[in-house]
């Protein structure tokens, strides 16, 4: 699983940069999940309800990854809280054996 961590999205310029550039990063690096620090995305006023509705997605596994067996297929479902927002994600992943 390839993860992308984005540190501190600040204000409108930060949100615009993510909106314009994230798709290309995801494609280029074959990203499965993106996690962003967006607490300053409203220019120092926290995450406003409107901004939070645009960017917040959820992934909640039914069982912890530590309970999975090597070779087990784990289905992934993501959902956006923003009406009309289109998301792409993998359908799931296979748990690898720990080395």
Image (cartoon, grey):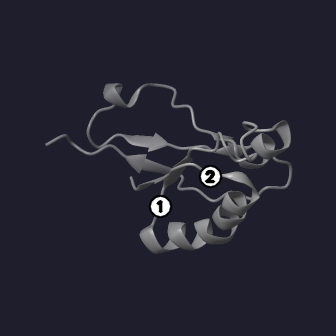
Residue 77 placement: quadrant: top right
Residue 81 appears anywhere in the view: no
Query: At x 64% / y 62%, what residue is drawn?
Result: 18
Task: Quickly name the residue at label 2.
Answer: 9
- Marks counted in the figure total 2
- Element marked by disc 1: loop
Question: Please, which residue is most extreme toward the front here?
Answer: 44
Residue 20 placement: quadrant: bottom right
Q: Position of residue 64 (x, y in %)?
A: 41, 26
Query: At x 76% / y 37%, what residue is drawn?
Result: 45
Residue 23 placement: quadrant: bottom right
Query: At x 51% / y 31%, what residue is drawn?
Result: 61
Task: Quickly name the residue at label 1.
Answer: 31
- Closer to the camera in the image, 48 or 72: 48
Q: Position of residue 17 (x, y in %)?
A: 66, 66
Q: Residues within 10 Å of mark 2 (few under 14, many from 20)?
A: many
């Amino acid at each position: 699983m390839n993860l992308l961590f984005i540190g501190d999205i600040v204000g409108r310029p930060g949100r615009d940069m993510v909106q314009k550039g994230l798709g290309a990063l995801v494609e280029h690096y074959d990203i499965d999940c993106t996690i962003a620090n967006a607490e300053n995305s409203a220019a120092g006023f926290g995450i406003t309800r409107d901004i939070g509705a645009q960017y917040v997605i959820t992934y909640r596994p039914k069982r912890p990854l530590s309970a999975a067996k090597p070779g087990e297929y784990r289905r992934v479902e993501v959902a956006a809280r923003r009406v009309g927002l289109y998301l792409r994600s993998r359908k799931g992943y296979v748990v690898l054996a720990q080395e």
